[in-house]
Structure formats: C-alpha cells, structure tokens
Image (tube, grey):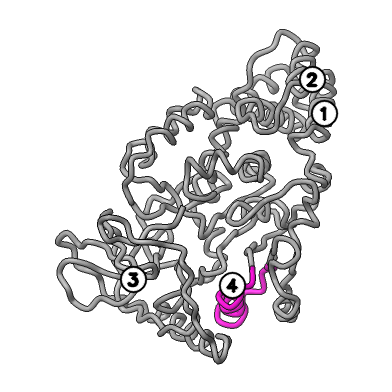
Amino acid sequence: MKWTRLLILLVLFIGGWFMIPKFESHITREQTVKQLIQQHEYTNLKQSAQLLREYKYCFAVLSLGDAFDENEQKMCKSIINRLNQSKLLDWGTSIPSLFRSFKDKGMVVPVYDKGFYHALMAIKGIRDIHQSQIPIYCFYNGPGDLKQSFQDELRSIPNVHVLDLQQTFPKIKFGGWSAKPAMLLAAPCQECILFDSDVWFVQSPETAFKQAQYRETGMLIYKDRTVFEDRTPARQWIVDVVPESEYSSLLNLRFMKTTTMHEVESGMVVMDKRRRFVAALTLAYLNSAPITPESHKTFHGEKETFWIGPLIVGEPFSVDPHLPLGFGHWNGTKDRFCSTQMAHADQDGRVFWVHGGVIENKFNLGSTLQSFTHYIEESGEYTFPDPSNICMKLNGKTPQLFEDKKGLEIINSTQQLWNKIKPKNYVYVQEETKHRNTDGEWIPNE
C-alpha cells in the first residue's frame, strides 16, 4: 500500500495535479488552511489561489480514497468542508451537490434578448441539420436578461433547458461576458461544450469530444486572432498570480511572447468538469463580480481566464494548435481578406465551427447573408474598417476556395434556417459602442 501511494503521488505531481506547500504533519496542514481561511479576503487573488490549490490536493486525495491513509483522508475531508463553507466558495449553492449533479454530455449557451435569434438558429441547426439530440442548457442571468416569450420558444425545442444563473448562485454576482464560466460550472453536464450565441457548426458539435487534445487533458480551448498591443502590465499580473511551478507552461503562449494581446477566444470551450472540477471553480471565481474590476482592466473580458485559471491551480488544458481562419467571401483583391466571421478547424484541419453568425453584420439582424466561399489561416495583421468588419492583410497568401460538399450543404441549410427564424420588420439601430481612434480604426469605447 505504501508503494502504491508513493506511485500515485508521483503520477499526480508529474501530471500537474498539485503544487502545494509541503507541511510537516496533517495537523500542521489543517491548521495552516484554517488560518488561511480566517485571514482570507475574497479579492486577494494570491490567497484565493493558495486555497484553491489546497482544495485541489484534497479533492484528489478523496477521489483516490484507499490509496491514502485514513488520517490524510480525514484531514482532507475537514479541509474540503471548511473551504466549501468559506467565503471563497460561499456562492449560495452546495459545491459537493453541484459536483454530484454532473453527468453525461451536454452543451451550454448564454442567451440574452439581443443574442436570442443567433442562439435559436444555432440550437435549431444542432437539432434539425446535425440531427443531434445532445442536451442543451440555455442560461440567462437574472430578471430582464431574457424575455419570457423567448424562454418559452427555447423550451419548446426537445431536450433544451432554460436556466437562470442567479438561481444556482444567488449569493454572488456574475455580469456580462464574465457569467459564461459560471454558466459552464452550473450546467449539469459532465462533459460540456460551452459556446457563444453567435457560434454555429459546420460539423456536428459532438466532434469536439473526439478531438485528441480534449481526450488527453479534459479541456480544450481555441486561439484568438493575433492582434498586437503592449500588454506588459498584464504579463506581470500573470507572473504574480501563477505559481512558479507553472512558469514553463507560459513559455509557449503567444501572449507571453508579446505576439498578441489575445491568446484564446471563448466562442467555444470544451471541458470535462469531473476531471477539471477545480479549474472550473477557479474560472468562476476569477469572473465573479468582486474580481472582474481587476481582471478585466488587465484583459479583454473573460476569455484569457480560460488558460490563466487552470494554470493557477496546476490543471492540464489544451490549446488547439491551429490559428483561426478568416471565413467569408474574397473578391480577389491581393492585399486583404475581409469578413466578420472567424472559423476554427478540427484536428484534421477541416472547418469545424464559426464565430460571428451567418450574416455580414451580426449586430444588424436584417443584414445580408454572408457568402462563405473562401477561407484562409490568419496572417496576424488586421485592420478594422468599421464596427462590423475585420480585414486581414494577406501578405502574399491566397485564400482557399471552400469546396467541402457536405460543409457547403450545411452552410446553405443553416442560412435557410436563419431566413426562417430571423425577426420580421426588423429595424437596426446602431449602438455607439465603438469609436474611431487617431488612425481611423474602430475600437471599443472604454
């Protein structure tokens, strides 16, 4: 039994399971955690990260059971109970009960009034075009976020569930983009595909579960566009909150190499929450309302937390190696390729999913259907002619003609579906969410 325990500890250490300070005895460890909890301030990221790493270690001990002696198991039960009742995780729901609720595969999508029609098209496409009956959990964030008629229409689709995030976590707030990780955590699926309302699929969404990188680590995220801006303070922030034992994992990230200000996007995230439970908890914590003023002034929204969170607690994750694709219509110009949409490939390089809807301007529901004739791997140089368009410099590359017959059929069916469900007599009112900078490019308002 002793050698079995040592072997398991070695495997856990090599696999990144824990990076916990060593203690002289069980009593010392438990006392130290108790003291940390008493001193803990919710907005102190370093304190919270240390407690979450303790949670991870004890969660592993209790999961493996008899591989550890009774004293260690007893200690970890006590630590887990203390942490579940501490202000760190006092979100108004039982964390153990939440974990026990995870089962089977499912999809999770945030739906709000303005994004309803995009989400409806994606969900009907999954049911009617891809013929998938996978459970879909549509989350809104409290009263006023999704009108009742929209909720009723979603519930009329078989195996679609509409849930209020604030009913699961009534004691902590999550706002805007930041609510997405909490929705992922709250959903009852074990293996979950989190996707944005304006994402749609050229292949069956369940292709995500077959990706080798997902099967290896239990978490898969995708690269964002390579857009450069000096983010030295953000990089320093990461070094401050990520343990030294994880620094080697930072070396391969474009963000840390100063290549881009956006490492990943969160249009689709795939996670096995039983394997990556503490990572899921950490993601929700990092995006809770008391924390976002700090994290969101450092990053653009919640998306970078999908790799920072796992690193903080030493959880494995995978970033798809492909760069994002520009996907749309190319008019033959030699210098640029313009399209609102960004696509991502599967492990074999085939177009898998698309972010940005099926129309030329996803913000204007009455705009013209996009023509998806060409695609190209990004060059890393972009211009933004207007709020609804993104142009990529070609730098001598030539976009490829999209000739996947099945993919073309799915695109055609998806756009026909959009024409059926889009709102009638729609009047577009452009919101002043962006302004031109001194170079004449559109950038978000502060």
User: Which dot, 3 or 1, sits closer to the camera?
Assistant: 3
Q: Quadrant of residue 54?
A: top right
Q: Amino acid at mark 2?
A: Lys
In the picture, the quarter occupied by the N terminus is top right
Q: Which residue is mark 2?
A: 34
Work out whether mark 2 precedes mark 1 in sequence or the reverse, and give the earlier one.
2
Tell me how far mark 3 sits from mark 1, CA to CA: 51 Å
| Callouts 3 and 4 close, C-beta under 8 Å | no
For the residues bearing labels 2 and 1, Cβ distance under 8 angstroms: yes
Q: Which residues are magenta?
A: 112-136
Q: CA distance from mark 3 to mark 4?
A: 21 Å
363 within the magenta span: no
Image marks 1 and 4: residues in contact by CB distance under 8 Å: no
Residue 124 on image: x %, y %? 61, 80
Using residue 369 as the reference point, say whether residue 164 is left or right of it. Answer: right
Residue 346 x/y as whole percent: 43, 61
Q: Which residue is mark 3?
A: 339
Spatial separation of the CA atoms under disc 1 and disc 4: 41 Å
Disc 1: which residue: 82
Disc on res. 114: 4
Q: Amino acid at mark 3?
A: Ser
User: At which x and y percent is residue 176?
Assistant: 61, 57
| Neighbours of disc 2 within 10 Å: few (<14), some (14-19), many (20+) | some
Instruction: Give the residue at x 48% y 31%.
Output: 237
